[in-house]
Amino acid sequence: MATDILDLVSGYLTLKKRGQNYFGLCPFHQEKTPSFSVNPEKQIFYCFGCQTGGNVFAFLMQYEGVSFPEAVKMLAQRAGIPLEFEEVDPAHTREVEALYSVNEFAARFYAHTLWSETGKAARDYLASRGLSDDDLRDYGLGYAASGWDHLVKRAQEEQVELSLLEKAGLVVKREAGGTYDRFRDRIIFPIYNLSGKVVAFGGRRLHDDQDTPKYINSPETAIYEKGKHLYGLYHGRDEVRKLDRAIFVEGYMDLLSLVCHGVRNVAATLGTALTTGQAHLIRRYTKNVVLMYDSDSAGSAATLRGADVLLAAGLAVSVAELPAGHDPDSFVREHGTAAVRELVAEAKNLFDYRLQQVAELPPQARTQGIRSLLQSLAKVPDRIDRSLLLARISQVLEINEKTLWDELESIIRQTRRRPARQSAVGRRLQGLTALAGRSRIEQAVEDLVRILLHHWDVAETVFTDLPESVKDASKWPILAYLRNCFTSGGTPRETDLVHRFQELDLSAFIVRTFNEKLEGMDFTRWATDCVRTIKKHAIDMQLQSLREEILQLQQQGEPVTALLKRCMELEQAKNSL
């Protein structure tokens, strides 16, 4: 039996019936007046405030921050239905489940040790750092006692295979035979995935010992890739979503100190450069990130090291500058929660932060600083955002805006060019096409979908002349589906579309579009203009491909007359549209 969306959402939110729908406060943005609606008949949800929507899978994916397969599994477990599907690699699946199980065993063992007499010194240390017992338990902290084989012995007592402990990175094999515990005399920080399962551990040495690293972490395993996890996000995700902002810190203690002082919308990057996987992970909950790293030069370097990755993922990035000599842990313990919140509220936009750094550089170093700033700007996906930021750079540094644009376009072309050598003209054409074409084609495809979902009577006008396929348009699969509806004589229905397109961006777009009011427009003319834009884009893509082929043939001394003729024909066809 399918999961009823009203039953599912009611388990998370308080809903009240109003007409045919049920309304409540949206969990995906802050609001005081309920604008989040659930339609039991259509089995969809929609928020009139933030325009997100979809079916049961979309709700679970967005609320719990899980993938579509994980959402399917969660709903199946909720309904008590065993999932029957052919596993690509059953052995791998068994290994994954075994690793989760052995990590859970280790987490229990370390937690038990922390709260035993053996863990008193560790508890005293954590208390001296201002951490409460409740928060220690919430985050599952533990203690690995000194000695070489405490975990090994407990595993043998409970008949846990040592080979599994080794695969999980919890024990290390000796060259002479036997195994020993990886974590010894260390405070243990379990690392959870977004489903609440322990995937790895971090360990901080309890006593000063210059012969051992201050921190060690689990190695990567079949269930743990460092670049795909953020420490503390599982526990702080609701607060991140509620406040629509995530604070990024570097380490375990930075995060836990903030949490113990009531600042819970925090995630830790585990002291490494941010990755694309982590950027997309946080995007499930917010598009606003505040970087709060140490005030020393290493902290500043970490801030800049992760910034470009966040920008490329479409995140808005700010920097909370800590006073000299402070890290987040020391700052919150000395100045308190209110000071942290004030620091976050006054966080500088990343580009203002970097602009300030460049402006303070000596003249001989400023050129490289400006180029580095433009390289970051090239990562910003939205052209309008780039334009506004570039104008700001021009104003603050008193540099001609056109000069900056020329340099920026040069950087963009260099990062997007093909491996094959191209002429300057070819690179410029490709760069300008990438800059200007993507947003136009995306908008044209979105507009066509909107028109068709509200005015299906223009379908014949659209599909008689629409190209078969096009690149650089995320909503194209919806348009392709609508074409199939038209050719088969069908009519698109909201519920069919929402259930067919499970990706969050697509399902939310579909529900949002059906809730729009499009009136008082010449829809046939609007649709014709959109089709014309798409056709021109398709021709541009053909021309770009031909020009690249011509350049390669010219370098090889091959004739290109036929290809040049084809380019002219395409240019004429484009001009006639």
Image: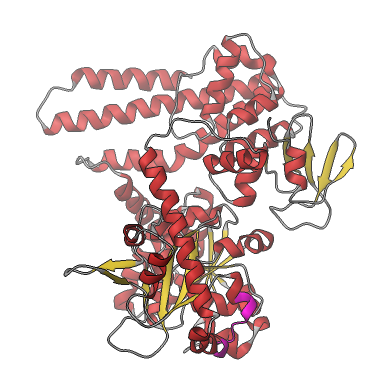
Position of 353 with respect to 540 (left or right) is right
Question: Residue most toward the left?
Answer: 557
Q: Position of residue 433 (x, y in %)?
A: 40, 38
Position of 87 with respect to 450 (left or right) is left
Position of 416 with respect to 464 (left or right) is left
Q: Position of residue 61 (x, y in %)?
A: 60, 45
Question: Residue most toward the right?
Answer: 19
Q: Which residue is drawn at the image coordinates 57% and 56% (left, top)?
A: 287
Judge whether 114 appears above or below 78 on screen: below
Q: Which residue is drawn at the image coordinates 56% and 27% (left, top)?
A: 478
Q: Position of residue 278 (x, y in %)?
A: 46, 57
Q: Which residues are magenta?
A: 127-135
Q: Position of residue 288 (x, y in %)?
A: 58, 61
Asked whether residue 276 is in view, the answer is no
Say how the picture is coloured: secondary structure
Judge whether 138 appears above or below 534 on screen: below
